[in-house]
Amino acid sequence: MGVLTLSTKRLDRKKQREEKKRAWMREEMHRLAASLEHEKVDEYLTYLTDPKRMLWKNFIGGVARGLGMAVGFSLLGALLIYVLQKVGWEKIPFIGDMINDIMNIIENKL
């Protein structure tokens, strides 16, 4: 009877440990599922499996980046020319000559 009781107790402890592991795994799976839901992985996978949608989004993104670069370059170029005019770009050795040549070309074309 003593041996049977010991083996029963061991089995009970083993079952308790296994149940704790299962409970921990269930909790981790729920946490992982909530995390994936929060990160919108299902939408991302849908995006990856739809080539037309992916191409369209990348096209629109490329157009937006191109326009942004063009506008930014134009604004920075205009600002640089404005600052150089105020500073007196004629006094800057290489840049002054180059800008004078560009200005003459532009005036002759118009």
Image (tube, rainbow, N blue to C red):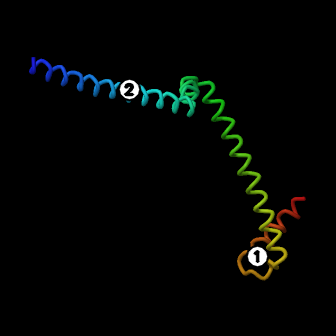
Quadrant in which residue 17 is drawn: top left
Alpha carbon separation for disc pair 1 and 2: 79 Å
Mark found first going from the N terminus, 1 or 2? 2
Q: Which residue is located at x 71 percent, y 51 percent?
A: 69
Q: Which residue is mark 2?
A: 23
Q: Which residue is mark 1?
A: 97
- Residue 5 x, y percent position in the rendering: 15, 20
8 up-or-down from 78: above or below: above
Q: Nearer the viewer, residue 20 or 58?
A: 20
98 up-or-down from 30: above or below: below
Q: Which residue is located at x 67 percent, y 39 percent?
A: 61
> What number is the disc on residue 8?
none
Amino acid type, mark 1:
Asp
Q: Which residue is located at x 65 percent, y 33 percent?
A: 57
| Most distant residue in the front direction | 1
Quadrant (top left, top right, bottom left, bottom right) of the C terminus: bottom right
Left or right: residue 77 compared with residue 4: right
Left or right: residue 85 compared with residue 41: right
